[in-house]
């Protein structure tokens, strides 16, 4: 059977320009790798084909003539996903189309009863490796779709939903596809080649704005360290890649395992390896020895979910008072030469212009290297969404295309959604100003960071200041909004 697996072209440029970070979709690579032998499997990450999605897909599907096409989509990518599914049905009507990912898992009932259901033949809920493997077998007459946990399928044009699948034993999974079956290339963080690696799945924290628990439950599972090293060897030696993003939801939940993993990485003596990871402040603050070991193993960039400087807002987010832990975690990371990206969330119910300004000032006080700022988003099925709806603060209930952290989909008790959007942008411009690359970034790209700091930034800033004098803050904001609207607009998909 010929199988084509696709990820969506939509991106969320919350850290830097939308062209600066493009990474492979690990989910489709893992699903493809864990199908039974004997199939022709192809992967394409449409983030690398953003300028010509329709042309690329039409030509690709006509060339490959796949029997099964898999689509993976986040909530804010689903609108594009529907358009692509429509296009695929037009170009290759005999192909079966299966939808998977977080949005499909959380919203399968709503999708199944919506007009969009006509473009999909199957929905995979939860982890896809075993469900898709069995679906392929069923399409070949070796299994029965009615007996596959985690699968939704059609009977007389209407979806029927099988029972929920159990979480997988990660030790049984093969490493993801990273070879020529992946048809797109050029994955990068700025000027550095990057690959994505997974060492665990799930998180046991109680953040109520996160939808992770609906994907895996409140669980934490790990791959065998030998399996992680096997995959890292492939990345380092076969893909010739030195930057690796670890997609784990929260790798530091098990401190002992992190130390063992670091020892295994250190033993491999990788040169110039830079690992980028997400972690929680509590674990990083309480375990300095772990942080030191992580730095020795090549962990160079850490994203910390700090979220807010307000104790009240942190409580509403289910985070608890982690301000002191945030400061200690940053102190530990920077002590051992690790760059810190601080995740901040704006738009809590009691936020006003002053509190938004204070949250940016809180970032400066923390001394983190780079902010990762987003607006509070009422993701489907989350506790936060329920709270905000009950309070009458959700301004956009169902246009999920703007649910990427960049747009205000809520209002506060003091700011309309439009005012919140403006203050989110304006206070950042005024308080944080222009980005200054931290030392770890300068080391990895001396040439381009020099050009940015001493040539490009001064020129752009002079032009920016001139525009500010001409059109004012509101004029600059209108230009910024127009740019955001264009980021995930694909003209060639209009009409689908």
Image (spheres, helix red, strand yellow):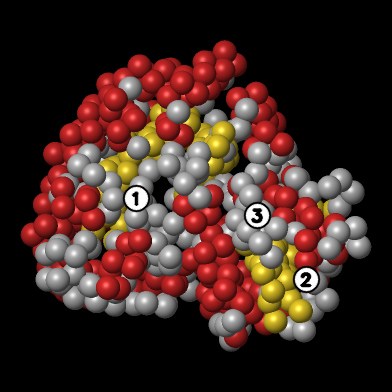
Q: Nearer the viewer, mark 2 or mark 3?
A: 3
Between the residue at mark 2 and the residue at mark 3, the CA separation in whole angstroms equals 21 Å
Query: Is 424 above or below relative to 270?
Result: below
Q: Which residue does the image show at 78% across and 71% down from the upper left?
A: 96
Q: Is residue 148 visible?
A: yes
The one nearer the camera, 134 or 34, is 134
Give the numbered dot on residue 96: 2
User: Do callouts 2 and 1 mark residues in contact (Cβ within 8 Å)?
Assistant: no
Give the numbered dot on residue 354: none
Between the residue at mark 2 and the residue at mark 1, the CA separation in whole angstroms equals 37 Å
The one nearer the camera, 54 or 77, is 77
User: Do callouts 2 and 3 mark residues in contact (Cβ within 8 Å)?
Assistant: no
Q: Secondary structure at mark 1?
A: loop
**Residue 43 pos. (x, y %):** 71, 54
Q: Secondary structure at mark 3?
A: loop
How many neighbours does mark 3 have within 10 angstroms: few (below 14), some (14-19), or many (20 or more)? Answer: some
Q: Which residue is mark 1?
A: 207
Query: Is 481 above or below relative to 341?
Result: below
Query: Is 438 above or below relative to 312?
Result: above
Whether residue 174 sits left or right of residue 14 in the image: it is: right
Q: Which residue is mark 3?
A: 165
Disc on the earlier residue, 2 or 3: 2
Badge count: 3
Disc on the earlier residue, 2 or 1: 2
**Residue 483 pos. (x, y %):** 36, 69
Q: Nearer the viewer, mark 2 or mark 1?
A: 1
Q: Kindly indicate the quadrant of the structure image that contains residue 52.
A: bottom right
């Amino acid at each position: 059977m010929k199988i084509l697996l696709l990820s969506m072209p939509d991106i969320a440029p919350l850290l830097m320009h939308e062209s600066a970070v493009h990474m492979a979709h690990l989910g489709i690579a893992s699903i493809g790798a864990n199908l039974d032998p004997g199939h022709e499997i192809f992967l394409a990450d449409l983030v690398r084909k953003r300028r010509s999605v329709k042309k690329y897909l039409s030509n690709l599907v006509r060339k490959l003539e796949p029997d099964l096409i898999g689509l993976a989509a986040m909530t804010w990518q689903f609108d594009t996903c529907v358009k692509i599914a429509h296009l695929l049905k037009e170009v290759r009507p005999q192909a079966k189309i299966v939808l998977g990912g977080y949005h499909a898992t959380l919203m399968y009932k709503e999708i199944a009863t919506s007009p969009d259901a006509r473009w999909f033949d199957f929905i995979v809920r939860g982890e896809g490796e075993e469900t898709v493997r069995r679906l392929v077998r069923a399409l070949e007459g070796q299994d029965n779709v009615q007996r596959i946990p985690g699968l939704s399928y059609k009977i007389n044009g209407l979806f029927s939903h099988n029972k929920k699948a159990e979480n997988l034993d990660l030790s049984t999974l093969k490493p993801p596809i990273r070879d020529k079956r992946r048809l797109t290339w050029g994955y990068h963080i700025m000027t550095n080649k990057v690959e994505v690696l997974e060492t665990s799945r799930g998180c046991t924290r109680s953040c109520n704005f996160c939808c992770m628990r609906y994907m895996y439950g409140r669980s934490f599972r790990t791959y065998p360290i030998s399996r992680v090293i096997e995959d890292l060897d492939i990345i380092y030696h076969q893909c010739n890649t030195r930057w690796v993003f670890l997609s784990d939801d929260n790798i530091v939940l098990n401190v002992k395992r992190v130390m063992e993993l670091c020892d295994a990485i250190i033993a491999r003596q990788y040169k110039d390896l830079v690992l980028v990871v997400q972690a929680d402040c509590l674990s990083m603050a309480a375990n300095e020895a772990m942080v030191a070991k992580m730095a020795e193993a090549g962990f160079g960039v850490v994203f910390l979910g700090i979220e807010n400087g307000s104790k009240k807002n942190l409580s509403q987010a289910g985070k608890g008072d982690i301000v002191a832990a945030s400061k200690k975690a940053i102190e530990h990371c920077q002590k051992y030469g690790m760059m810190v990206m601080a995740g901040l969330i704006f738009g809590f119910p009691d936020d006003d212009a002053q509190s938004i300004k204070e949250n940016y000032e809180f970032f400066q006080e923390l001394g983190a290297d780079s902010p990762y700022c987003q607006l509070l988003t009422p993701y489907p099925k989350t506790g936060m969404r329920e709270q905000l709806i009950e309070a009458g603060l959700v301004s956009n209930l169902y246009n999920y295309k703007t649910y990427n952290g960049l747009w205000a989909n809520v209002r506060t008790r003091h700011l309309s959604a439009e005012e919140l959007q403006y203050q989110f942008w304006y206070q950042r411009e005024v308080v944080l100003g222009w980005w200054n690359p931290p030392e770890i970034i300068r080391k990895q790209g001396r040439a381009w960071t020099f050009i940015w700091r001493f040539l490009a930034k001064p020129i752009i800033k002079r032009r920016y200041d001139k525009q500010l004098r001409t059109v004012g803050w509101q004029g600059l904001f209108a230009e910024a909004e127009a740019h955001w609207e264009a980021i995930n607009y694909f003209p060639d998909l209009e009409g689908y």
